[in-house]
Image (cartoon, rainbow, N blue to C red):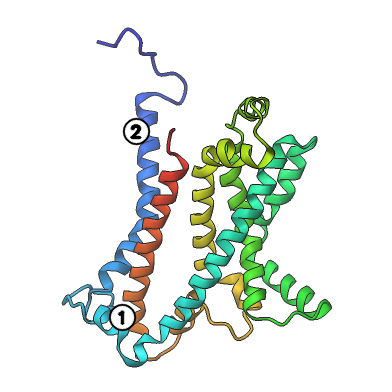
Amino acid sequence: MRKPNSLPPAGLFTRNGVRFAVACGVFAMILLYLPIVGLILLSFSAQPLTGIPWPLTIEWYTSLFEGENARWLKPLATSVGIGLLVSFSATAAALLIGRAVPLARRSGSLLATYLSVIVMPGILIGIAILIFYRGLIGIRTGFWSVFLAHFIWALPFALLCILIVVVRFDRRLLDAARDLGAGRLRRFLDVELPLLMPGISASLFFSFLLSFNELPRTLYARGGIITLPYYLWTASSSHSTQVSLIYALSAVITVASFLLTLAAMRLLTRKE
């Protein structure tokens, strides 16, 4: 018997329609996560290049820090350093922009301008930075050109994280604080900043991950800088003895990125 308050399914939301939608979602998740799970399984294989996860071993994980196998540590430090710098700078810029966009007259057009970078090909952005900043301005490719490319890529996503919490912010709270004598800085620190913190935290996480995993834009702007994604890309396409270690290293990075993404989503969707 149907519950009194329940509504009968209508249109596409029939029982069979819901089952079909769920099946499509499950199939999409299988396509997404099956290669990732396969990569993690092969990282424990004694012969991962064969594609057979047997016999099992942890040799590749223990070898990651031995001798020449530890050459990935310097690219890791470079990626972490650039990622942290991009994370804080993109979040700070997004916080300034995000607080102003809803108050602008043509907020829709302004927002579309900032978010247009998302749909632009990464290689196009990398070539543009290479030609413009190096050819016309004279900035050498290297650390700061990579930072600039990553900043351009991370800023729209950081802005989205900030806007999600900004549009729900009740500006009457600022008016009340002003009536009580609070200055502009005090209103921001005591009233606005705590309520925007979930979006700020998510922006920090996503900006770092976008920079940490970025490759297409880095290819043209890196100069002599070797980031971890670039190191993994070159090592996996070579015929050196480190190819098998890439499975273990990729599995570690995948799990760490997945956990950071879950933490960011948790902060972004957290209810007060």
Please provide percent x and percent y for residue 27: 36, 48
Please provide percent x and percent y for residue 9: 40, 18
SS class, disc 2: helix
Kindly identify the residue that appears in the image at 68 percent across and 48 percent down: 96
Give the label, 1 or 2, closer to the camera: 1
**Amino acid tagged 1:** Leu
Whether residue 2 is visible, yes or no, is yes
Whether 238 is drawn above or below 191: the answer is: below
Whether residue 47 is visible, yes or no, is no
**Amino acid tagged 2:** Arg
Circle 1 sits on which residue? 49
Whether 164 is drawn above or below 123: the answer is: above
Q: Which mark is residue 19?
A: 2
Q: Quadrant of the C terminus?
A: top left
Q: Residues within 10 Å of mark 1 (few under 14, many from 20)?
A: few
Give the mark, 1 or 2, whose residue is nearer the N terminus. Answer: 2
Residue 70 vs residue 156: left or right? Answer: left
SS class, disc 1: helix
Give the image quarter of residue 245: bottom left
